[in-house]
Amino acid sequence: MTNIPKTDTICALSTPPGMGAIAVIRLSGPGSFEITGKVFSPADKKLDIKTARSHTIHLGIIGTDTSILDEVLISIFRAPHSYTGEDVIEISCHGSVYIQQKTLELLLTHGARLAKPGEFTLRAFMNRKFDLSQAEAVADLIASHSGSSHDLAVQQMRGGFSKKISALRQSLVEFTALIELELDFSEEHMIFADRADLNSLLEKIEIELRILVQSFSLGNVIKKGIPVAIIGKPNVGKSTLLNAILNEEKAIVSEIPGTTRDAIEDTIVIGGYSFRFIDTAGLRAAEDKIETIGIERTWEKIGDAAIILYVFDATAQSFADVMESLSEFKEITADKTHRLILIGNKMDKIKSLPKGFKDFVEHETIFVSGKRKENIHLIAEHLQQVIEETKISDKTIVSNSRHYEALQKALDSILSVRTGLLEGISPDLLTIDIRKALYHLGEITGEITTDEILGTIFSRFCVGK
């Protein structure tokens, strides 16, 4: 996929397939103007597409000598001032599926070929319009489903993450050059790279890498949606609560314990953050095989959740009862990656303050009525606050699993170099681990890459991007 012929001109539909008001068909490559000129007749008879100025739009007819297909707008972008860095033309036509297909057929007849998934963005990367991490952010931007995932993609696309990685890599490159210079003068036992300075640099890089690696847990949930598990004993109103939060009858509500046999999921955006709510089977001794499977899946969902809403019946369970029930979750609640929030439900049935009300408040508890949808907004506000407490607006957040793996490997290599310095190993062995760190950092931005990596990344893009 990376062996792009210099004479190749590609085309594809860049808007979603299907009928709409308008559709945009994009061409990129050295033959873009010539091919378009063969199928497009401008309304301005003095205009020649081949010599038209960049970043201009022109009205005209697309078709053949014998038939008119559509009245269109042609947008012109001359290399290198285009998305791909090549000559680019975008044809805005009416959104008829027939018009889209016939326009593409005309372009193919006159020398263009259909683009592969992600090929426009691949060409932009190959022409150094942006690096590999920025190219991946384009796909994340297209797939963003909330304000937070959009902001995360925009930050990465604008190069904030790339600059940080490049700076770390450059500082290592400079020291590597000095250490390798020592190898050239090994017989003279000359030292060019001050070991104390190198250790200070490695300590700084280690801290930076640890921060980036640790940010992945937050970045991943922002990108995919923050998982919120709704758990508790049977018949405490978990399904009613889910329906109230989603404002629709998503889960079956029944007075019969054990109604929910499997995890029910749905997503809602709150304050720009996407939350994946998971209603789970009630935790009790299972009465049949199906319920057993449901409870096993509940434990899996609890382990995966970033936030756990433990629902209890405020009319029947005291603070001591809830704490005793929570003792089953000691391993999970002790893990700081899980945030536990208590939800006291059925407040519409209670006439006085719940037993141990003061203790409940101190343990992050929200009292609601799922049936009457009272105080449900407090849950939404609290969830948003939890994420905003974690997120730091000016901090670089890693959301790409490929980047996370590369950062983790780079960190391991840096730790090996620091250990080697303490043990006083020879410069040639030090450079091996430093070069490993450089390699893994270079993988992120594309300074070091392979056809296999590029093929995997860009094949995930839609055709036309």
Image (tube, rainbow, N blue to C red):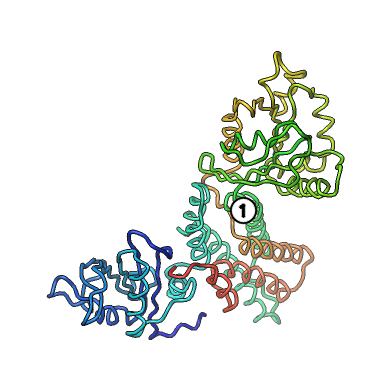
Q: Is residue 97 above or below residue 335?
A: below
Horizontally, is 137 left or right of 112 in the view? right
Residue, far top: 352
Q: Mark 1 points at which residue?
A: 220
Q: Nearer the viewer, residue 213 or 50?
A: 50
Q: Residue at left 69%, top 24%?
A: 346
Q: In which quarter of the image is residue 39?
A: bottom left
Q: Residue at left 29%, top 73%?
A: 78
Q: In this view, does 207 lie above or below 172?
A: above
Amino acid carrying mark 1 in the image = Asn
Q: Which of 460 and 15 is in front in this view?
A: 15
x%, y% of residue 332? 78, 43
Residue, far left: 46
Q: In this view, does 16 lie above or below 108?
A: above
x%, y% of residue 369? 64, 26
Q: Residue at left 62%, top 64%?
A: 402
Q: Which of 246 and 153 is in front in this view?
A: 246
